[in-house]
Image: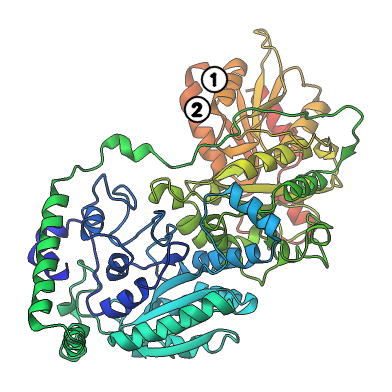
Amino acid sequence: MTELYEENFKIVSKYVHATSRGHEVIQTALGMQLLPQDYAFPYYRDDAMLLSIGMKPYDLMLQLLAKKDDPFSGGRTYYSHPSLKDDDKPKIPHQSSATGMQAIPATGVALGFHYRESLSEEQREAVDASSDSSVTSDSIVVCSLGDASVTEGEIAEAFQMAALKQLPILYLVQDNGWDISASAAETRAQNAAEYAAGFHGIEAISIDGTDFEESYNTLNEVIEKIRTERRPFLVHATVPLLNHHTSGVRMEFYRDDLEEARSRDPYPRMRKLLLDNGFSEQDVEGYDAFAKAEVKKALDLALQQPDPEPADLFTNDFAPTPITEEKGERSPEGAEKVVMVDCALFAIEELMKKHPECLLYGQDVGGRLGGVFREAATLAQKFGDNRVFNTPIQEAFIIGSTVGMSAAGLKPIVEVQFADYIWPGLNQLFTEVSRSCYLSNGKWPVSMILRVPIGAYGSGGPYHSSSMESVVSNIRGLKIAYPSNGADLKGLMKAAYYDPNPVVIFEHKGLYWSKVKGTKGAMSVEPSEDYVLPFGKAWVLQEIWKKEEEETLSIITYGMGVHWAMNATAELGVQNRVEIVDLRTLHPLDYETVVTSVKKCGKCLVVTEEPSDNSFSRALQGRIQEECFNYLDAPVMVIGSENMPAIPLNSILEETMIPSTEKVKNKIEEILNY
């Protein structure tokens, strides 16, 4: 295949590709031993591994040429970026370009196996019945890595959890001594086996990846131990890189070791092994001729296949959700009001009672504390430390592991402690979580909930007070909730659980306990267990009738902004002139309700806690202005926090920074009098 691609370089290099030339022996030795119940995360040079698990050259060429029938992604992603869910082959969840980031989702699958194995037989059967996963008690995970990727920080997070939890995973590192143009001597203080040895509990082995017998036998022994002993291994295989890094970076540009690399070509060694074991020269020549004819035929056929159509762009961004209508009892008769944080706690407790595939993890959510806001209080005691557990300080792992957990048939609910701490996890959220459904062409949606306590109050200072919904709302492929009260939080939490897509829920810390002045409205009668609130349904919680003789205003807001708006209109006595729309969810966003309200009222104010420049609120302002222009009697206005780099600790400075009821009152008067 590599030779054919070189012969047809101009044709096949319309899109970038890499090949496994020099790596093919270790890849084949591994692929031959994987079973349909295993999960694999091959990287972009692993076409030989894909062939050895049963893929055909034609399958790979459809992706090479980004054709409509590309079995992995429908023409959406690069060559040898597989995602596979065939019954007779190892399962391959979607992953990115695999420069280290894939280690966390792969380790997440192994963590999922570890959790499933802690369940009773009855619970395991219930988990199996709720998913289409093919996990068995001897399933293993393989994470394939290039040596250069092992320097990535997220590798350390994956190794740490694999060692800590003793997970059934094999990290296969193919070491060809190069990044793109940087050599190992320039970029690595030690090889991968030496590095992994520092993680107590990972057994690391170095082998010659060009020797088929050594590769096969070592992997056979390692895989058998992982299947039975359920612990992690790293196999570090030295190999030469005999083709270009990719078709876009030619090795002649920078390599000065090509002759040495060719001296380690595994193919002559493989031929000799065959000849030494009873195969004739004629047999081997026949295999060569067959392979060349087959790949030529495959390429000719693949070139004739249709490209995707423009309409194909718009499919599989999300998997269909069953929750499309509000159902259940929102305010049961005789029920008491509870604080917002408890509505979420009770929702998760109900879900965990009903669904053994539901589990919760993050920093400090375990039994000793139950979350820094007591948002997980008593759950570990009720459901066990295997279902509700603490993680290390690893935001990337917390978020990215959900890709693997979901692929293993589980439904993880995870949290970062404060919105300010989400930044180390954005790589996983953007690259792995949000794109999985789309780039796998619908095969691998990530079913997870990420809870994010957010917002400022009570002098939390610059590292516990930020709003950052604008960043997350710019990640396509996520659903995002930002409720203002407990009933909405419970209903949205339930909807998020039954949604097969990734969901981020922003939960304002100042509303959790309704201790902040003016936030009693965040308390709710706890909805019934079957209450669900679909995403994309805004709530007109203060509705008015338009009177032509009066100036009227529509306030569009969410989270804490709802309470500032409600308090401000009450103090001004203008409840009959100001309509308030609580968005509830930022994606999908109920533009229909927003536009209807603004057109009716003729004026609009967007209230947010975020600094407003370059923000979600400014984008919403622009869309409202565009769609409602002919109905407006004033410019659409925005009030948010001051546009400073951080929220200061001092209470006077914090108060100056963020909006308040008083500031919203002033803005309401300004726009009504415009």
With respect to residue 87, does 309 lie above or below?
above
Mark 2 highlights which residue? Answer: 625
Quadrant the N terminus occupies: bottom left
Decide if residue 145 is on the left or right side of residue 569. Answer: left
Quadrant the C terminus occupies: top right
Which amino acid type is marked by label 1? Leu
Image x and y of residue 75, in percent: 28, 49
Decide if residue 309 is on the left or right side of residue 580. Answer: left
Quadrant of the image occupied by residue 29 = bottom left
| C-alpha separation, residue under disc 2 versus residue under disc 1 | 8 Å
Tags 2 and 1 in contact by the CB under 8 Å rule?
Answer: yes
Circle 2 SS class: helix
Which amino acid type is marked by label 2? Gln
Q: Is residue 261 visible?
A: yes
Quadrant of the image occupied by residue 397 = bottom right
Mark 1 highlights which residue? Answer: 632
